[in-house]
Image (cartoon, grey):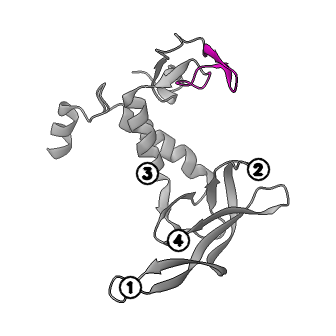
Amino acid sequence: MDTPETNPLLTAFETMTCSRCGGGGKYSYCQMYGNTCFKCHGAGKVYTKRGMAAIAYRTSLRSVPANQVQVGWLFYVEGSVFGGKAGWMKVVAVGEDHGSKWGKKNPETGETEWQPYFTISCDAGDGVSGYGHSFCNPTDLAKAIPDKGYLKTTTKLALEYQATLNKTGQVTKSRKAKATA
C-alpha cells in the first residue's frame, strides 16, 4: 500500500499538463503580460476536475461564519492591489465597526436601515496591525481556522476525499454504495 512517505504524489492535489502551453508556461506575447500563459499562470500545470473538487472541499472545511471567528485564530487575508501581504494571519480583534455602515433596504417599509460592518482585524507578524476584512453580514463565510495544525488536517481530509472521486470530480459509485451501507 502506498503512503505519503513512499509516494509523494499522494500529498499533492491532482494536476495535469496545461493544454494551452503544453507545460512550458508560456504562450503568445502580450504587451501587458509578456508571454505568460493565461490558463496556468506560467506554472505549466493546472488542476484536474478531481483536484479542483478536492480543493473546493478543503476550502469549505476552512470556512466558518465570520461571527464565529475568535481572537487568536488564523484568518486568510487576500493580497491587495496596494501591495498588502496575503496569507494566514493571527486575528487580533473581531466585532462590529460602528465607524462605517452599510445600507440595507427594509422590504416592508422601503426605508434604508444602516447596519455596522462586521470586521476581522489581523496582525501580519510584522508589527503592523490592520490587515483584515469587513463583512456586511456577520454570517458570511470567512476563511478562518483555530490553529496551524488544522491546516494540515484539512489538507489530509481533502486528499482522502480526492481519492474517492472519479475523473469528473464526482464521488465514484462504489464509494457511494459503501457510504450508504
> Dot 1 corresponds to which residue?
110
Q: Is residue 9 left or right of residue 54?
A: right
Identified by mark 1, the residue type is Gly
Nearer to me, 74 or 67: 67
Identified by mark 3, the residue type is Ser
- Ranked by sequence position, the earlier of labels 4 and 2 is 2
Assign a secondary structure to mark 3.
Answer: helix
The label nearer to you, 3 versus 2, is 2
Q: Is residue 51 left or right of residue 66?
A: left
Which image quadrant for residue 56? top left
> Dot 3 corresponds to which residue?
60
The label nearer to you, 2 versus 1, is 1
User: Measured from the top left, where is residue 161 in percent x and y?
Assistant: 36, 38
> Dot 2 corresponds to which residue?
82
Task: Tell me if label 2 and label 1 are in contact, CB under 8 Å.
Answer: no
Question: Residue at the spot x=36%, y=89% of the render?
Answer: 109
3D distance between C-alphas at marks 3 and 4: 20 Å
Res 136 label? 4
Q: Would you say residue 33 sits in the magenta stretch?
A: yes
